Each structure stands twice: as C-alpha cells, then as structure tokens.
Amino acid sequence: MTHAQRFISDIQYYSTAAYPCSYLEGRLARSQVAAPSEAVDATKYDVLIQDGFRRSGSFVYRPQCDNCKACLSIRLPISEFKPNRSQKRAWAQHQSLTFKVMKPTFSPEHYDLYKRYQKSRHPGGGMDIDDEAQYTDFLVRSNVRSWLVEFRAPASSDPRAELKMVSIIDQLKDGLSAVYTFYAPEAGQNFGTFNVLWQIQQAKSLGLSYLYLGYWIEGCRKMDYKSCFKPHELMQNGTWQTPHPNIS
C-alpha cells in the first residue's frame, strides 16, 4: 500500500481487466482505478498525482500492467527549465495567438476542432470517432480545479478570430497538470511545443513548482516530445528522480 492510499482512507482501488495497450504494439495494459470517482476532489487529487495517478474526465487511474513498468510519470521543475533552440523558435512562431481561460464546457466549435485533430493525428486510434458524449466525458467532466483555454489567431478581415488550439489544464497545489491539448492540423505549425511552453509560463506566473505532463515511455514516438523539455523528473520506484542524461 502506497503513501497516497494510506492517506486517503475513503478511496478504494481496483484493477481493470486487461486491454490492448495504446502505446506499445502487441502488449496488454491494465490500470489501477481510484473509486468512487466522485469522491476524488481537488485535495485528494493533489495527493494521488504525487503517487503516479492521472485523470481522464472523472476517471482517476495509473498504469498497473502485468510484467511491464514502461509508463513513467514525468514532470518539469519550473524554476530549472531552460528552452532549447527549437523550443524558442516555436515560442516565437506562435506569439501572435491570443488566449482565453474559462471553465471546461462543451462547445460545438471546440468539438469540431477535436474531431479534425483526431482524424489527422490519430486516425484509427478510436478517439477519431468519439461522439459528443464521449468527448464530454473525456475533456469537459472534472471533479478537480480545471481550466479550458482557447487559443485563437488574431482577427483580420473576419471579426471572429479563428480557433487554433484548446487545452484542458488542472491546477494542483504545487503545479499545473497538462490533461490534453488538441489543435488545428496545419503544416509547419508547432502548436504542441508552444502550448507546453505557455503552460510553463503560466505555472511560473502563479508561483507553482511543476508542470505535470502525464506518462512517458522510452522509445515511444507519441511521447518523445515530453523528454525534450529539460531538465525533467520521472517517477521511478515510487519517487521523483532526475534521469541519467543517457536515458532521456
């Protein structure tokens, strides 16, 4: 039993049945789930994320796979982060974007952008056919402190600025947690990198210590971008550790 599980006495934990892994081909995954989900409020989630849990909607979980520990929680210490050259270019490239922070809510405009993003970036992955209810369960529903952030291109001849990107972000006691970001699938853009940099700046302005980026798997192309933000920390053997330079 972990420290988080001892601390939160009214939360139960169960293991799911095995299901196909989304990241490592040919493998089966299993998750440990905190229940009941409605009992995991912001204060309890602050503790659980320290123990490697994440959330998807109101579903709070962490990997608990048979004979596999490839998924590692990753976070960035804000005060130590230094952007590399390509990250500086991405920041400069999208400086003209305007942003608006609001409570998570369903919007047909957001949902249309989400469907475009999934069809372009993750075709056949299952999320490209999410209906409105699935989208709402995944990104709008939350029992913790969450923001929805719109990023728009400056208006020109059109009085309404074009929606380019949407982020769902959780605010924790010690940091921000990047839940999910989707954006316009345009050639030559660096929206994803810009968005992580924007979240780092927001965490810094709020006096927070970390940006939590979810899980990272060594050698997984979908997750490579996370380890490009340095220095970072990985949760290994139950503690946050700075990896050896040759690892990531």
Image (cartoon, rainbow, N blue to C red):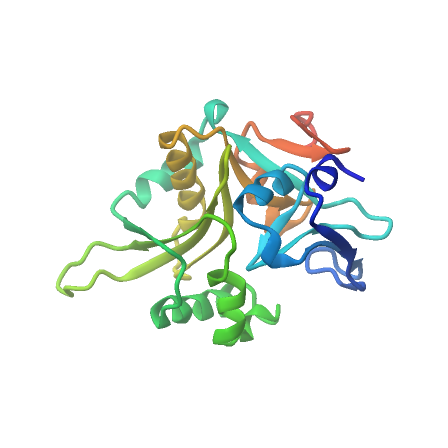
Q: Residue furthest top?
A: 80
Residue 248 appears in the rendering: no
Q: Residue furthest front?
A: 10
Q: Which residue: 46% across, 26% down?
A: 82
Of 166 and 12, nearer the camera is: 12
Give the quadrant of the N terminus: top right
Q: Is residue 42 left or right of residue 103?
A: right
- Residue 205: quarter of image: top left
Q: Which residue: 61% across, 49% down?
A: 54
Examine the rendered structure and indicate whether residue 157 appears above or below residue 132.
Answer: above
Of 57 and 112, nearer the camera is: 57
Of 156 and 170, nearer the camera is: 170
| Residue 80 image point, x, y percent | 49, 23
Q: Which residue: 68% across, 45% down?
A: 217
Examine the rendered structure and indicate whether residue 46 appears above or below residue 24.
Answer: above
- Residue 125: quarter of image: bottom right
Residue 12 appears in the rendering: yes
Q: Which residue: 61% across, 54% down?
A: 39
| Residue 141 image point, x, y percent | 50, 62
Label count reads 0
Q: Residue furthest right?
A: 67
Q: Is residue 11 left or right of residue 176?
A: right
Give the quadrant of the C terminus: top right
Examine the rendered structure and indicate whether residue 27 appears above or below residue 198.
Answer: below
- Residue 162: quarter of image: bottom left
| Residue 35 image point, x, y percent | 69, 56
| Residue 76 image point, x, y percent | 54, 32
Q: Is residue 226 left or right of residue 235?
A: left
